[in-house]
Each structure stands twice: as structure tokens, then as C-alpha cells.
Image (cartoon, coloured by chain):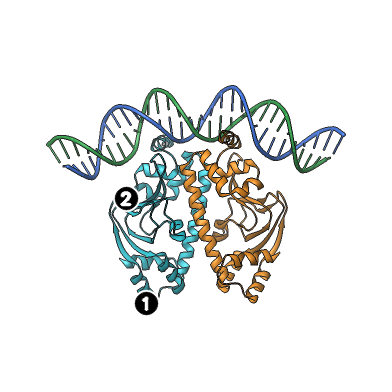
Chain colours: A cyan, B orange, C blue, D green
Amino acid sequence: MHKTLLDYINQHTTLPLTREEEALVETTFQPKKVRKKQYFLQEGDVCKYVGFIVKGAMRQYSVDEKGVEHIVHLFIENWWASDRESALMLTPSKYNIDAWEDTELLIATIADMVDMMEKIPSFGQMTRLMDNRNAIASQRRLNSTISNTAEKRYEEFVDSHPQFIQRFPQHFIASFLGITKETLSRVRKQAMK
Amino acid sequence: MHKTLLDYINQHTTLPLTREEEALVETTFQPKKVRKKQYFLQEGDVCKYVGFIVKGAMRQYSVDEKGVEHIVHLFIENWWASDRESALMLTPSKYNIDAWEDTELLIATIADMVDMMEKIPSFGQMTRLMDNRNAIASQRRLNSTISNTAEKRYEEFVDSHPQFIQRFPQHFIASFLGITKETLSRVRKQAMK
DNA sequence: AAAAAGCGTTGACATTTATCAACGCTTTTT
DNA sequence: AAAAAGCGTTGATAAATGTCAACGCTTTTT
């Protein structure tokens, strides 16, 4: 179970973890299972944990006044799930995170994360790398959203996240792109030619 | 000139800078002026610097095949301007950054930034704080973009960035929101009632 | 002082996307 | 095995937003 995470850390850092560091990671991260359709985080709750996905698939979404869900993130293996705003500011989350497939996570509190960043150099390094990647991905997605039509956004999505197409139903992808499932269906039909 | 930056760092950290640390910051950051309409970063170039804006206003934007500009960021005093993707990956930037008002910056290379994060604890702390705030702001903006109509997006923008309304022309705001200037003009007219 | 360029607005119209309802098909629940 | 729920598609129509052209006004350039 923890092996996946240790490998992940070593793959995203220049200095390999020492035995002691591995031990700290193993005792700090707690295994957690979230079954399909169950919540990992529920709107209104303060996000207490960061979860590393060992196996499974999840989504993060908000629900508007009309009850429509808007998916802001999709997660699969080796992704980190949490609501950073809620976790850092200690405010009630505006989002839900639930499992689309039965999911196995390794969870840690924010305090534990900060602690490990300080005590384990490669953990800090890995975290910074993830921050950078996230910032880059957000910027790209934002630029795509304000610059492109639905069709082009979908194309870019397929190019950048081919794994997601396999794992999630089409109406999740539509929501992630900010369009309706009907529009995505039509866009795909067009693009097939 | 550097005083603004030193104050900024001290305001975003728990440990105040020592004399030696201040000296390092002062020798590392170089002053740079960018006059209105001049580029700080041009599409196709690799972004070499991070700029702290001491005075002035800038924008970051991409240009699509039709020649239309899409503004991804607006910056004023006490903001950090750079294209993180280009700077970190050493790839040609897809963006332009230019000055809307005559602007005074303090610039440092990415290597210098990394160096200072390592040598100056509060600099690292400040950087992490900025990363967190950025991540939170990106998430909010993304959620707003995929969830809301143009009108609501504009309302949220006014609430969260009232300073920008004063500093930038309306068609910049429209572009930032991913709509045309005509649509923003109509949305505002509607909202006035 | 005159000319040019930039900005915001408006109208007419086109295009994109959303909404609502219905349908077949598959998967899940009973 | 039957019933229900979920998924993707399609059609008809509505709403949101974009496009293009024109106009007054202000600011900048000549």
C-alpha cells in the first residue's frame, strides 16, 4: 500500500528517501477506502486531509443554485485530492469530492504535510514540483477556457488527458470542460469527420 | 526602490529579514523599467525573469490564430509577473507580458529565486504563501468560468478585484473574463438596474 | 490646431451553446 | 427475471454570446 507512495516520491525527487524518512511517511499516511459514490469531502465541511490516490478514480465538483454539478477536477492513481482553499484557510469547502470507482487513498492532515515538508527534504522537493505542475496546468486550462470554443477545448483535453477519457463517463468530461453533455455529444459527432 | 519589496516580504512572513538577508535581496533583484505598451516578455521567448511590480500595471495574454488577444492575468503593484511554464520548463512562452502603465519592476532569474528560497527562510515562506494564494485564486476563477454566466462572472470579478476596475480599460476586463467587450458592455447595462 | 487612434456603446444579425423532451441501450438494483 | 436508473444521442427550440459596422467622445499623436 505505502510502496506506491514511496515510489512516487522517489520518482519526483533527486535525493532518494532514507530508511528513517520512509518510516515517517509510512506512519504518517493512513490508508483509507472510499467506495463508489461515497464522499471523501462534502460541501460545508472543512477539508482536513490531503489524499494520495493509490487506486481508483474521484472527482471534485461544486453544485450551483439550480442543483447542477460543475466538475473542477478529476483524479486517478497518483494524484493528490484535497480542497486547498478549505484546508489552508480552514473555511467550509464549496466542493464535494467523491469516488467514481472504489478508491484507496493514503491520507495525511495538512499539519502532517507541513511537518514532512520540513523534516524530509525530498518530500518538500516533491511538493514544490507538484505545485509547479499544478500552476502550469491551471494556467493552460484557464487559457484554453477563455480562448477556445467547446470543440477545441475538447480536442486539447483529449490530447492532454487521454487516460481520463477511458475512466470517466462523457458527461463528467463535459462538465469538466464547462459545457453540457448534449453539446459534447454534438461536438464529438462533428469532430469525427 | 527595494524597500517596497523588503516590506512586502516582511509582511508575508513570520520571521523578519536579517540585515544580511536584506542585502542579498537588494543585490539580487535588479531594477527594470518597462514603459507603456513595451514588452516585458514576448511570445516565443523563454521567460528568464520573475518581476515584482513596484509601480505600474501590466497584463499577460495569448494571441490566437485570428489575432485576438486573450488576457490571462492582470498585474498591479505588489504582484509577481512571469510565465511560470516557460521559466520552469525552459520552453518558448505562449504569452506576452506588456505594460499598460509605465512600470517599475524588480527582477530576478529563476535560479536566483531558487537560491534565495534556500538561503533565506522567510523568502521561502513568502514564496509558499504566494503559491498557495495563487492556487486558491486559480481554482476559484476556474470554477467561476465553468459554472457561471458572463454576468455572474463579472459580478464576482468586481467583488474580488475592485482595484482592477479602476486601473484597466473595460475591454481588458472583458478579455480576462473570456467574453467580448460588446457583451461586457451589455452585461453592465443590464446589471445597473 | 488638426488628425488619428483608442474606448465604450448600440443596433442588426449570426453563431454557439443550453434547455427540454424523448428514445434506445446497458448496467445496476430489486 | 423484471424494474429502475444511468448513459449517450438526437430533435426542436430558446437563450447567451459573438460578429460587424457605425457612432460619439476622449486622449494621443502629428
Image disc number at residue A19: 1
Tell which circle, 1 or 2, labels the residue nearer the N-terminal end.
1
Q: Residue at x 46, y 69 (%)?
A: A124
| Element carrying mark 1 | helix
Alpha-carbon span between mark 1 and mark 2:
35 Å
Which of the image's four quarters has the C terminus of chain A?
A: top left
Q: Residue at x 55, y 64 (%)?
A: B127
Residue furthest out toward the front: B193
Q: Callout 2: few (<14), some (14-19), or many (20+) C-alpha neighbours within 10 Å? A: many
Q: Is residue A42 left or right of residue C7?
A: left
**Disc 2: which chain?**
A
Residue B43 in sight from this viewpoint = no
* Above/below status of D16 relative to A55: above
**Disc 1: which chain?**
A
- Which one is nearer the viewer's eye here, A29 or A62? A62
* Above/below status of B87 relative to A66: below
Q: Is residue D22 left or right of residue A69?
A: right
Kindly indicate the quadrant of the structure image that contains residue A49. bottom left
Identify the residue under disc 2.
Answer: A100
- Which one is nearer the viewer's eye here, B31 or A94? A94
| Element carrying mark 2 | loop
Report the number of numbered marks. 2
- Say which of marks 1 and 2 sits in front: 2
Q: Position of residue A153 (x, y in %)?
A: 47, 43
Do the residues at discs 1 and 2 belong to one chain?
yes
